[in-house]
């Protein structure tokens, strides 16, 4: 599910409430060793207790002696509490009832920083409750020069800059650059914490590139992120340029540096997301030859916008424009695309130059007994991404239940990725349309194969007139997506 993780403890527990205190004491002891404050430890203890109690009370039939596993996992910048069981499916009525102490209610109160749900097929189900490691206040890392820069945002520097790959020793300097440029509004939390930055670099799931002055001050940053070690496609993101150095094409220079690195490494391609609040990052992607393949409507709150760029609307959530840039030849793949979207996706494939062939949908393709699916819920962003690993005979029921559970957490934008390498995808795409999903994006080479992304807007208002799109191709794609959404 994730890479570069270390299991700190794994307990196999009989599903009895009176065993919980000993388990919670172990959780609290281990979490305390990672530097969490007393308040954070209380949060961890509380959401662990609620999650375990939910399994004990609702996952097994009356009189059944069930068992479940409680895991403590250390990932870069995170402590993860995972609960696995092979009991009954999650009881959504507990969440929907609003009962005090219910798992959903506790999570919605923000005790966990991230929540992930996994359907494990015959192995049951898993919930992960994630707490970020304690983070320093970026303001405490500011020097006198940093503070002077913040107070004089209009100053333009003529200093020469150079490009190089980031090392762990640059973590503090990067954090200071982010704070100078964005204050506390930047969307990627980890980048504010030097310890977490160093761990992400050491894990190998992120490689970063910097623009620095002669004095080694970090004034630009661009990351190449991987879903797992050994991935042949990366995501370009965390593009940051100090306000004093804007207008000097630092983003384009860093992107070219990153692309040269990726080409030599044998990466097939790079995808990236650009906010539709302004055209600057969009223009940079188009200039480098990236192709628009979709929009993630309402994926982030307006509060994540850069502080020196005027937001499009205080009442509208931000949307993202999805790009793919081919770097090296990728494998030939047969993909099964819903008939209604074949023409649009073929246009994208031709523009990118992908080695693809359309296959014929087959409703008689054998399905597994159980669906394998997982979701990542980000309350602070107000969005969730569901990934389908394998279709099962229970796909429709599992997906409806998961959608209901996520909606009840007041998540504004919900996305789901379907594998285009499976002949049943056009059929299940139509089933999801009946639930209210619509087309979002074509994502090439995502997780060892192409996916089609769909989106569901949960009481989220989107005004296409307030979405800024740089290219004519992007504008046509937005119109296509809005038509499919029927707004």
Image (cartoon, helix red, strand yellow):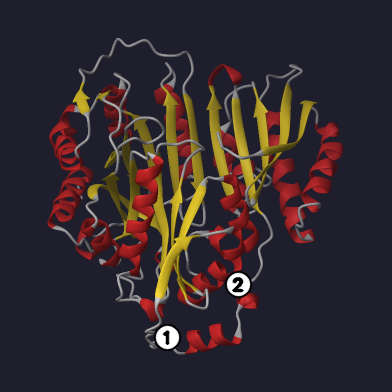
The reply to whether residue 104 is in sight is yes
User: Which is nearer the N-term, disc 1 or disc 2?
Assistant: 2
Q: Disc 1 marks which residue?
A: 153
Q: Position of residue 114 (x, y in %)?
A: 57, 48
Q: Nearer the viewer, residue 157 or 420?
A: 157
Please determine whether, in this image, residue 154 is positioned above or below residue 44: below
> Dot 2: within a 10 Å radius of its alpha carbon, few (fewer than 14), some, or many (20 or more) residues?
many
Q: Nearer the viewer, residue 201 or 22?
A: 201
Mark number displayed over residue 301: none
Look at the numbered disc 1 and give the secondary structure of its residue.
loop
The reply to whether residue 467 is in sight is no
Please determine whether, in this image, residue 430 is positioned above or below residue 263: above
Q: Left of 453 or right of it: where is 229?
A: right
Residue at the image position 49 percent from the left and 52 percent from the top: 207
Q: Position of residue 39 (x, y in %)?
A: 75, 60
> Dot 1: within a 10 Å radius of its alpha carbon, few (fewer than 14), some, or many (20 or more) residues?
some
Q: Nearer the viewer, residue 416 or 251?
A: 251
Please determine whether, in this image, residue 168 is positioned above or below residue 161: above
Residue at the image position 30 percent from the left and 37 percent from the top: 444
Figure disc tally: 2
Residue at the image position 56 percent from the left and 37 percent from the top: 2
Q: Position of residue 383 (x, y in %)?
A: 44, 50
Q: Nearer the viewer, residue 9 or 177?
A: 177
Choose top left, top right, bottom left or bottom right for residue 314: bottom left
Choose top left, top right, bottom left or bottom right for residue 356: top left
Residue at the image position 23 percent from the left and 63 percent from the top: 283
Q: Left of 17 or right of it: where is 427?
A: left
Mark number displayed over residue 138: 2
Q: Left of 139 or right of it: where is 445?
A: left
Q: Left of 248 or right of it: where is 184?
A: right
């Amino acid at each position: 599910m994730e890479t570069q993780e270390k299991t700190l403890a794994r307990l196999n527990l009989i599903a009895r409430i009176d065993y919980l205190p000993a388990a919670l004491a172990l959780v609290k002891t281990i979490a305390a060793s990672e530097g969490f404050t007393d308040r954070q430890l209380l949060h961890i203890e509380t959401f662990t207790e609620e999650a375990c109690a939910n399994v004990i009370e609702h996952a097994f039939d009356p009189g059944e002696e069930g068992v479940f596993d409680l895991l403590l996992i250390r990932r870069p910048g995170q402590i993860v509490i995972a609960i696995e069981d092979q009991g009954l499916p999650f009881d959504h009525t507990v969440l929907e009832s609003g009962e005090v102490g219910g798992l959903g209610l506790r999570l919605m109160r923000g005790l966990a920083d991230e929540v992930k749900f996994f359907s494990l097929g015959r192995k049951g189900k898993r919930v992960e409750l994630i707490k970020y490691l304690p983070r320093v206040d970026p303001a405490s890392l500011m020097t006198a020069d940093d503070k002077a820069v913040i107070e004089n945002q209009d100053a333009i520097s003529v200093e020469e800059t150079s490009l190089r790959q980031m090392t762990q020793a640059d973590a503090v300097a990067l954090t200071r650059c982010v704070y100078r440029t964005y204050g506390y509004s930047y969307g990627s939390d980890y980048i504010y914490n030097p310890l977490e930055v160093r761990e992400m670099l050491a894990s190998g799931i992120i490689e970063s590139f910097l623009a620095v002055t002669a004095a080694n001050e970090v004034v630009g940053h661009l990351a190449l992120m991987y879903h797992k070690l050994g991935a042949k496609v990366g995501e370009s993101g965390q593009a940051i340029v100090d306000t004093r150095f804007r207008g000097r094409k630092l983003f384009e220079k860093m992107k070219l540096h990153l692309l040269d690195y990726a080409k030599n490494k044998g990466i097939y391609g790079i995808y990236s997301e650009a906010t539709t609040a302004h055209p600057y990052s969009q223009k940079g992607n188009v200039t480098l030859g990236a192709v628009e393949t979709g929009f993630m409507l309402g994926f982030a709150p307006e509060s994540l916008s850069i502080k020196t760029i005027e937001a499009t609307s205080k009442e509208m959530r931000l949307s993202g424009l999805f790009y793919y840039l081919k770097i090296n030849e990728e494998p030939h793949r047969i993909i099964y695309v819903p008939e209604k979207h074949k023409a649009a996706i073929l246009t994208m494939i031709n523009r990118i130059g992908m080695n693809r062939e359309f296959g014929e949908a087959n409703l008689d393709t054998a399905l597994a007994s159980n669906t394998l699916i997982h979701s990542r819920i980000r309350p602070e962003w107000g969005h969730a991404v569901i990934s389908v690993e394998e279709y099962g005979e229970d796909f429709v029921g599992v997906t409806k239940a998961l959608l209901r559970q996520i909606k009840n957490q007041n998540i504004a934008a919900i996305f789901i990725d379907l594998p285009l390498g499976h002949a049943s995808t056009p059929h299940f795409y139509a089933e999801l349309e009946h639930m209210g999903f619509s087309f979002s994006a074509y994502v090439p080479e995502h997780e060892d194969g192409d996916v089609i992304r769909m989106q569901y807007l949960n009481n989220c208002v989107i005004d296409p007139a307030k979405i800024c799109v740089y290219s004519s191709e992007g504008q046509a794609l937005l119109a296509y997506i809005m038509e499919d959404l029927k707004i």
